[in-house]
Image (cartoon, helix red, strand yellow):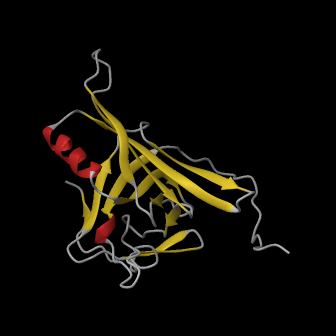
Amino acid sequence: MACTSLTKGRGLQCDRIAGGIKYVYFGVYDEFDANATTGEVYGTGVVEAAGAITDIEMQGGKGLYRYALPRGESSLTETIAGSTEAGTIYTTQSITIKLNQLSTADQYQVKLLATTKLIIFAELNQLNAAGKNVIVGMGLRNGMRLNSGTDVSGAAFADHNGYSWTFDGMEEGFMAVVADYTTTPFDNGDFDIPLGIVIS
């Protein structure tokens, strides 16, 4: 007897999509509401059901920090790793973002990001059936960390001058899709992000 049951099949998609990431939103892990007993953010600060994030609750005066990304330069990957022998499965989540132009402000931010445990939301170029950008959440249980990257000047005039940062995490579950927004990302009625989206 199977432990679980499949619920649906999948046909060939009739539409076309675009790859890449438009924006990333950084949320400091400890600034999401946590379960008073366990300290867990997942299930309290971020609620996920059937692969969709249906609720986001952040502490007073806290918000998400948005980074705009150059077109065609950033990507995310979720790798599934399982062991039939041990009966285990987990995922490694990784997102690499590229930013143009070295700056004093960004040098300071990379120092802060390197010491901060994060939950990362990535707004994809992919559109859903309602014509809105798909947003996925990463590091929902254990957080994401900046663990590698480069800050480069480039050599030739046409070379990349700026940053390439890779954040990764390890989860027992999968990244989840944020519930559809109405007009702007994260404007969902069930979401409580007091400071909103910080752009600059």
Dividing the image into 4 quarters, which one contains the C terminus? bottom left
Residue 168, position as x, y percentages in the image? 44, 50
Please provide percent x and percent y for residue 126: 52, 51
Closer to the camera in the image, 134 or 14: 134
Viewer-closest of 88 and 96: 88
Residue drawn at 15 percent across, 43 percent down: 105
Tell me: residue 87, above or below residue 124.
below
Q: Residue furthest front?
A: 86
Give me the residue at 54% from left, 59% from top: 128
Q: Position of residue 182 (x, y in %)?
A: 42, 70
Q: Which residue is drawn at the image coordinates 46% and 51% (left, top)? A: 124
Above/below status of 150 relative to 19: above
Q: Quadrant of residue 45?
A: bottom left
Regarding residue 79, the answer to whether it shows in the image is yes
Residue drawn at (29%, 21%), measured in percent from left and top?
154
Can you name the residue that lies furthest to the top here?
156
Q: Is residue 137 above or below residue 22?
A: below
